[in-house]
Amino acid sequence: MIQLKNIDKYYDSRFQRTFILKGVNLEVKQGEFVSIMGPSGAGKSTLLNIIGLLDEASAGEYYFWDEPAHRIKEKQKVQYHRSHIGFIFQAFHLIDELNVYENIETPLVYRGVKGKERKALVADLLDRFNIVAKKDLFPSQLSGGQQQLVAIARAIIGNPKLLLADEPTGNLHSEQGEMIMKLLKKLNEEGMTIIQVTHSKENAQYGTRIVKLVDGLVQEDFPVENRK
Amino acid sequence: MLLRFVIRNFKKRPFLNFIKVLGLALGLSGILFIALFLKNELTYDAFHSKADRILRFTTTNSSMFGNNHFARIYNSEQIPDLAATFPEIETYVRLAPMRGGVVMHNEQYYSINEAFVCDSTFFRVFDATLLVGDKNSVLESPGSMVITKSFAQKVFGNADPIGKTISLPAGQFYGEQTDFTVKGVMKDFPQNSHFHPELLTTPARGEISWWAFTYLLLKPNANPKNIEAGYAEFLAKISDRKEDEIETKAYLQKITAIHLHSDKLREIEANGNMTNIYVLSVAALILLLISMSNYASLNLGMSGFNTNFIAINRVLGSTPHINLRYFAAESVFIVLASIIIAFLISVPVNAVIAKYFGMNLFHTNSVLVILVVIVFSFLGILAGLQPVLRQSIGKIYRPSRNLFHRNKITINRGIIISQYTFAIVLIAAVIVISRQTHYALSNSMTPKDDNLICFESVHASVQQKFELFKEELLKHPTIESVSAMMEPPGGEANDQFGYELEGHEPPTEESQNRIGVFPCDYSFASIFNLEFLAGKNFTESNADVEGSGEYIINETAMHLLNYDDASQIIGKNFKLFSPGTPIQLPEGKIIGVVNDFHLSSIKKRVEPLVMFKRDKLWLLNFVVSYQPGMRETALADIQSVWKELFPAYPFSHEHVGAMYRNVYRTELLQARLLTIFTIISIFISSMGLLGISLLVAQQRVKEIGIRKVNGAQVSEILAMLNRSFVKWVIIAFVIATPLAWLAMDKWLENFAYKTGLSWWIFALAGALALGIALLTVSVQSWKAATRNPVEALRYE
């Protein structure tokens, strides 16, 4: 599904080139749950952003469903964001001005889904995530766990093939974090491909494979044993 | 969803958004009124369908009237010949004014403000709507009168005025009482006409001659230059002189140019002028710039709030298009809200203007209103969108390194500095103009208590009874003094006589051997508190006997007569020769020299003037001063005397102070308008600055908290927060001062006598701007600085 070949990411300052990623090769198959781990500054989030088409690699090739994603235009990226890729973030990044229902609905609006259909889809998800009672609340009125739940609902409502999670439990206490990880695992079991960035070994155990990144290089890449 | 989001976002920061809306609304209302007022000023007399072919004919003559340019001509009897001579002229109409008078109907007197004896061609030249009567025939026969609807209402009520007789009392236009027959009723002239006659009439007998305003209707495509150029030849022919002896020059001015471009003597009504047009245009431009930049600046400041929103939306699959649409929607929403507020402001303001100035600016101007609103909205939406675009363009169109910046505030220093530059220039202008108008009024002939009233241009038969009037009035203890003069206060002393002075070599050219004259009553010098440099006032018992004439001159006249020491000229024999009139003035002596006084506007230099007294002659204007503080009783006394002596004539008088305010009304209006626009501009700028300071304080909450935890005092925090604002105002001051100085220096050039441009004016303007800015900013800074740091840091 995803194939990265020799991905470089660097910034040029006046006299030197600073590499964030250097020669990263990675292949992710459909249905995998990959955890990218590594110390701070290793390039984990940058890699995730490149996979999510939020950032561009400085060099190398990136194939998404065998399409050369490193060559596609802005307009096409929007199509990928709309139909193939969902995101969740450490800081949730819900839209403060919209309530729970509207937040979840937003991606459907951008995809041009009709009102009635939107209503049905959102209602379905609210029900599934057990947050029907919260649908009229605003993000500031929710706990962190609930906010992340909403963020996940928003990320998957468009039925993406790939879910990218940047430290999804980083701002949550352990109990809520566990709840979120279980949900991700469930989604994976239902067929969703997931790539998450995490510091936590424990959280990585929910996935199927771990990629360790150190100083922009893939140091280790191994399947998870004793998956939680 | 777009709208819902916009409204919620609006509610989330109600104060900042309210500032945006209010700033735009004030700007829009101001600009709207300026535009409407300018349109009104610029379209004077354009309603005549032949406006482009109607020209006013005037002349100057270097040996008559001091080469002054009058709005009317004194020899209007030549016009029929002129029209016959020049093929360019289709027809003409002369308007001979019936000055300051009354008309009679059924033994009742009615005062008239403006009335003309005119040619029968009036309705062929001018467009006026006749309600009763036929345009082509109504003025056909001699003594036919057309009155306006409101005048008909005043005189006849609801009765039919046609065929009724209206008489002019003896001495008003003809020597004896003359009857006219009302043949037609016309609509009142529109407000944007340069004249508003209440009645028009054809001559009862004879032809129009002597002074008359003269308008020529030219044939289509005729060249008015031909008439101007051929006038000398024409005049030579009718007066049997050689062409090169003719000193008279002819001028033709388009009727549409009269209101703004004519500053001649004895205009029918006071005209507007271009300076006001420029001042207002600049004010509108400044207002537009300030309100737009204010909106842009606040939007720029708040765009930090949006970066997050843009980033999230991008992740969720929105296109740049959708983001742009959101900001456009927000801009449209703000602009619409401000249009509504502007509408709420404008309607009552328009009502007030209509009430006090008699012009309904909204009436028949809906196209202009809509145009102004559309252009303003368009600019507003652009101004609102532009900084957001510039700020967020990277986030909208290009992936950035850090997707989520939080609340990064961008402040456009340029906007704040230029706003304060305008503010300082405006404040300085207001100070200078107010000072100059105050100077002008305090140098007028208004007494300190303004306890002086004037009966302007009284009727000839009233003039004859001046002595009696004075005598009767002085019986009342409330009355201080009574005098009379040829020109009213604020008027122009334009008449010049030839003169002879003992021991004075007259100038070689005869035309220069003239001096301004000013007939007045004995008490003239005392009632106006004129200061004597030497000599004394008229003696009251003096009679007009050859050899005992008494003359008082002003300081300028003394210099003209080559004296520097006032006491030297006292007692010198002096004689005046009145040109054209058979009236002889007695030879006599110069008995006094007074300080120059400003009878007319201080825009003009004081002319040499000789004052003298002639019984019952040329004393057209009565002035009466009363005991200060006894205004009501004094006016009642004066009225009772007037009613008793002159029952036929309306008791119409004016305080001298008001007459001078009328002389300087342009400047007073400018001062008032500028004050309003300065206040609006400063208000908008301050609101903007308040918003910006709010944003800055919010952005620095954490920094302030950390500084306070580390021991910073409130005063240090305040200084830190206010420092940059102070710096900007100082930069604005540096830019504004030379601009204001240049502009005001130019403005003051209009005056022959003026106040200086002292440094303190600019210092005061700068200090005021700084004070306002500091006050505005400190509200927020104080809140931020005194906040408990724990609160600020808790959530970080």
Image (cartoon, coloured by chain):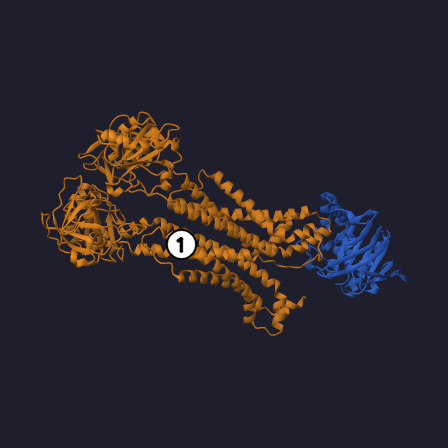
Chain colours: A blue, B orange
What percent of the width, then of the height, locates residue B748?
37, 53
**Foreground of the two, B156 or B369:** B369
Residue at horizontal 16%, vertical 46%?
Answer: B576
* Element class at badge 1: helix
Judge whether residue A159 can be spotted in this image.
Answer: no
B373 lies above or below B387: above
In terms of image quadrants, where is residue B68?
Answer: top left
Q: Who is closer to the viewer here, B559 or B206?
A: B559
User: From the viewer's perspective, is B794 left or right of A65?
Assistant: left
> B293 left or right of A131?
left
Residue at the extreme right = A225
- Answer whether residue B553 is visible to the viewer in this image: yes
Residue ID for mark 1: B744
Side of B592 relative to B725 (left or right): left
Q: Would residue A112 be found to the left or right of residue B139 on screen?
A: right
Could you say where residue A126 lies in the image, as x and y percent from the top left?
A: 76, 52
Q: Residues within 10 Å of mark 1 (few under 14, many from 20)?
A: some
**Where does residue B391 sit, x and y in percent of width and height?**
63, 53
Q: Quadrant of residue B149?
A: top left
The quadrant of the picture occupied by the C terminus of chain B is: bottom right
Q: Residue furthest bottom?
A: B711
Amino acid type at image mark 1:
Met
Q: Position of residue A210 (x, y in %)?
A: 86, 60
Quadrant for residue B247, please give it: top left
